[in-house]
Amino acid sequence: MAAAMFSLEGKCVVVTGGGRGIGRGISRALAKAGARVVIAGRSAAPLEDTAEELRGLGAEALVVPTDVTVRADLDRLAAAALERFGRIDGWVNNAGSAAPGDVGALIDLDERQWDAVVGLNLKAAFFACQVAAKAMKAGGSILNISSRSGSQPNPMTGQYGAAKAGLENLTVTMAVEWGHMGLRVNAIAPGVVLTEDSTVTGSMRSESRRQRQIDTVPLRRLGVVDDVGPLAVYFMSDESAWISGAIVPVNGGSRVPVGYLTYLHHVNERMRAQESAA
């Protein structure tokens, strides 16, 4: 009997930032496809909660609390995966964000804000790729989670967009340099994806802001975490064996830079207020 397409049975996949949001959705999709999932992140509690969900789906799950900005932690993560499962077949670099304190206009951005965002979203992601490449003795698939911000204007978190642009360039460069090692390196660039954190306390908590962004999406809705997971499964599967160096957008068909529109909305409001006061 032929194996099911996109099956990950027997494969071990590491997911950084796997306890929350898009990372949890990816971990869930991998588990459903049969993967043994190693979930990494800074906070143990959401990792354990996600692991319990995956075990409930019949998958093996290993929790490894990890600060991806610490190189020794990345080495320890790979070692833990190899010790438990004997191999690493796939690695998803999902960990990345910009904290509220790092949001600001480029003209006022300080060095700490720059280093915090670029360090997490570019430097740490690169060294995670490097650790993964060295650990995958028999080849495998590395997947970076980028953002629409990597190819579009990203006002108020310009350093985040710059980091994601850098990650996309590294993705295609690593695909070239590491292809002879049997390694495939690809990236997914999601649009606006609603998560529990973003809708409760984050940037998507405002209904009016969500609607402004929906208005730019041809499919007339924002993303959910389960929109990204199936594509991650594909990139981890044997069916994607001849795909490397790809950057795939997942954004409901939107080609409009939402951050740019949102920024202009606030600029226009300020200018109208100034004109009224004059």
Image (cartoon, grey):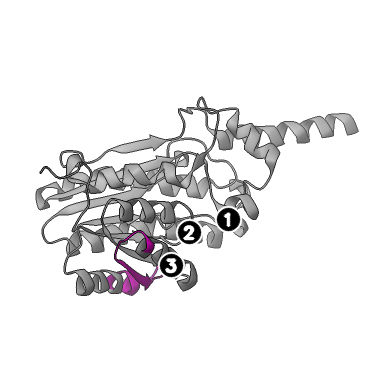
Residue 70 appearing in the image: yes
Label 3 crowd bin: few (<14), some (14–19), many (20+), radius 10 Å: many
Say what secondary structure mark 3 lies in.
helix
Which range of residues does the magenta coloring cover? 56-75
- Rounded to the nearest angstrom, the CA distance separating label 2 from label 1 is 8 Å
- Rounded to the nearest angstrom, the CA distance separating label 2 from label 3 is 8 Å
Left or right: where 236 falls relative to 182: right
Split into 4 quadrants, where in the image is the C terminus? top right
Residue flagged by tag 1: what amino acid is it?
A: Asp
- Write down the residue under mark 2: 20
Residue 262 forms part of the magenta stretch? no
Split into 4 quadrants, where in the image is the N terminus? top left
Labels 2 and 3: the sequence-earlier one: 2
Residue 68 appearing in the image: no
For the residues labelled 2 and 1, say whether their Cβ atoms are less than 8 Å apart: yes
Vertical comparison of 193 with 8: above or below: above
Q: Which mark is residue 47?
A: 3
Which quadrant of the figure has residue 235? top left
Which quadrant of the figure has residue 51? bottom left
- Write down the residue under mark 1: 197
Say what secondary structure mark 1 lies in.
helix
Label 2 crowd bin: few (<14), some (14–19), many (20+), radius 10 Å: many
Residue 218 rendering spot, x and y as whole percentages:
51, 24
- Rounded to the nearest angstrom, the CA distance separating label 3 from label 1 is 15 Å
| Residue drawn at (43%, 45%) of the image | 226
| Residue drawn at (43%, 60%) of the image | 120
Vertical comparison of 141 with 17: above or below: above
